[in-house]
Amino acid sequence: MTALPSAQPGLLSRLPLVGFIARDIGRDINIVFYLLTILVTALVLAIKTWGLVALAMTALAVVPVYFVLLILITRG
């Protein structure tokens, strides 16, 4: 584990809900893997509870992210 150099606190680290996660990622990058595990577990539990609707709503929420990624890839 290597310590990343601390940067000036940005807008993301000031937000109440995700600020502590952004600061933790700034200290240790391995937190991302724990976060992904938590998100996948929450998705599986949502699908078990609400069925295919939870999967469809998750896919619908990710569409803008994919559009931005595709635009960034094509711009070079």
Image: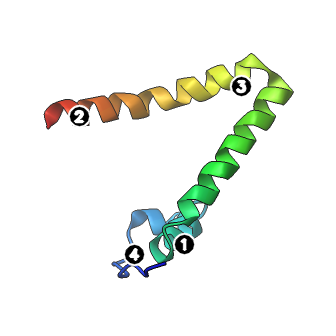
Give the number of the disc on residue 9: 4
Instruction: Give the mark, 2 or 1, whose residue is nearer the N terminus.
Output: 1
Residue shown at 43%/80% (left/top)? Answer: 2
Q: According to the image, label 1 marks what residue? A: 24
Distance in Å between CA atoms under marks 1 and 3: 29 Å
- Asked where in the image residue 11 lies, by quadrant, the reply is bottom left
Up-down relation of residue 55 to residue 3 (above or below): above
The residue lying at 77 percent from left, 27 percent from top is: 47
Where in the figure is residue 56, as x and y percent of width and height?
A: 63, 20
Asked whether disc 2 touches disc 3, contact meaning CB atoms under 8 Å apart, the reply is no
Q: Residues within 10 Å of mark 4 (few under 14, many from 20)?
A: few
Residue at left offset 18%, top offset 30%: 74
Between label 4 and label 3, give the one nearer the viewer: 3
Query: Mark 1 or mark 4: which comes first in sequence?
Result: 4
The mark closer to the camera, 1 or 4, is: 1
Q: Nearer the viewer, residue 60 or 17?
A: 60
Compared with 13, 74 (above or below) is: above
Amino acid at the residue labelled 1: Asp
Element carrying mark 1: helix
Question: Please, is residue 8 above or below residue 34 in the view?
Answer: below
Q: Which residue is mark 2?
A: 73
Mark 4: which secondary structure?
Answer: loop
User: Do residues under tags 1 and 3 come within 8 Å of each other at their CB atoms?
Assistant: no
Mark 4–mark 2 contact, CB under 8 Å? no
Q: Is disc 3 surrounded by few (<14), some (14 to 19) or many (20+) residues within 10 Å?
A: some
Q: Please state which amino acid type lies under the numbered disc 3.
A: Ala
Q: Quadrant of the C terminus?
A: top left
Cα–Cα gap, marks 4 and 2: 28 Å
Residue 54, which numbered label? 3
Q: Earlier in the sequence, mark 1 or mark 3?
A: 1
